[in-house]
Image (tube, rainbow, N blue to C red):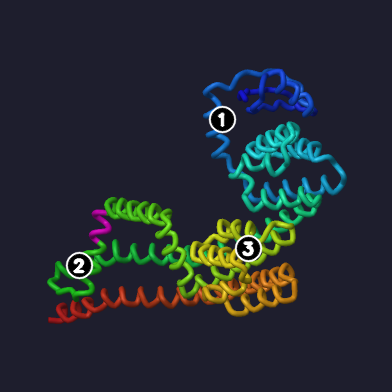
Amino acid sequence: MAIYRYKARDQRGKSVGGIMDAPSQVELADRLRKMGYVITGISPAGRAINLDKLFLRFQHIKPEDMILFNVQLSNMVDAGLALLTALRTISVQTENKALKKVIEDISVRVESGSSLSEAMQNYPRCFSKLMVSMIRAGEASGNLGLVLKRLADFGESELDLRQKVSSALLYPAVLSVAATAVIIFIVTFIIPKFAEIFSKVGVPLPLFTRILNVAGLTIKNYWYLLILGIVILLFGVRIYITTQNGRLRFDSFKLSIPITGPLIRKAAISRFARTLAMLSASGVHILESLEILEGTIGNEVLARVITTVREGVRGGTKISEPLKISGEFPPDTVQMIAAGEETGNLDGMLNKTADLYDAAVSYSIKRLTTLLEPLFLVIMGCVVAVIMASILAPMFDLVKVMRR
């Protein structure tokens, strides 16, 4: 199978181009004509293919683009359009260049006899294992349109949840940066000025003031070394958390943070429940569903719990039993899942669990933003008060010296 670069015009006369694999130029030309393109040129891609693949790899495909793709494909399939026709139509309408090229290639593969799920497997950066597995199940059951609709709804709920959590975590981060900047400014510029004045008149500085003065002068004179040290530290931490043990420790630390930890856990449990419900309802085998969840839960601690659950289910136990033993899932969640297993309504109970935790996340975010602002103001006030006290203490000594 050779790789060719092509240039053509679509049905609206717009210039299009890309790279496709085909047994020969003649067969590629035939495929492009079937897609409705007027060919203007075909040539072997040669070594340039690597540059194009590299460019495509770094093209960003937003979650919103994938949601729109699922909605469009679902609507067209439900309306009775042939899958290939639907893909070609979406390809023409898609504005994102990277996604457009992907859909064009998927269209070619489907036309060549591949199933949609098989074609999507070639683009794991665009189509997750979750999506491919659900579409494969939808193809087998004849409910592809319904599965695509579920994927679109799931994508919207996931995006909404992710944006809520990100916004909630961004707020304390911004406050922390602002507070740190103010403290550094005071320590670097204000305290050294006062220390210089006190030194000239012979007023001894208290120990804490001397410490702050040395810290300020160090930051002022060796800021580049401090920045380099911070960069090296962050780089080292980033490398460490890519290791299995490092990722486990980092994710465990995130869950243990008093204010944000419970929020992260609730969001992860919501994702677990909704994803498992959707996979189960779409006909994906429970063991495959749990394997997919291990890679999508977003937390190594909870992923290991799911691994234990999968091994338990393979051995004949229920999902709720390993969850209860792990201690990582709240008792009410375990009880709802156990009730769903007992009544044969696991999908329904999982969806209810996800809805409850979505609501809990929203409430936690509101509570977090309400509490953090006054909390940071109090902390900031205490820090500034301590710093000001380190300045005022020698000032009283200065007044005594001036009176003599």
What span is colored magenta in the figure? Answer: 217-222
Foreground tag (2 vs 1): 1
Disc number placed over residue 52 in the picture, else none: 1
Quote the CA–CA distance across marks 2 and 1: 64 Å
The answer to whether residue 371 is seen in the rendering is yes
Query: Which amino acid lies under the numbered mark 1 shown in the image of this protein?
Result: Asp
The answer to whether residue 170 is seen in the rendering is no
Q: Earlier in the sequence, mark 1 or mark 3?
A: 1
Q: Quadrant of residue 275?
A: bottom right
Specify whether residue 291 is painted magenta: no
Quote the CA–CA distance across marks 1 and 3: 34 Å
The residue at the point 75 percent across, 33 percent down is 111
Residue 153 is situated, as x and y percent measured from the top left of the image, at 73, 58
Q: Are marks 2 and 3 in contact (CB under 8 Å)?
A: no
| Quadrant (top left, top right, bottom left, bottom right) of the N terminus | top right
Dot 2, how many residues are within 10 Å of its Cα: few (below 14), some (14-19), or many (20+)? some
Quote the CA–CA distance across marks 2 and 3: 54 Å
Q: Secondary structure at mark 2?
A: helix
The residue at the point 66 percent across, 42 percent down is 120
Q: Earlier in the sequence, mark 2 or mark 3?
A: 3
Given the current orientation, which residue lies at the most extreme right position? 80
| Quadrant (top left, top right, bottom left, bottom right) of the C terminus | bottom left
Residue position for label 3:
161
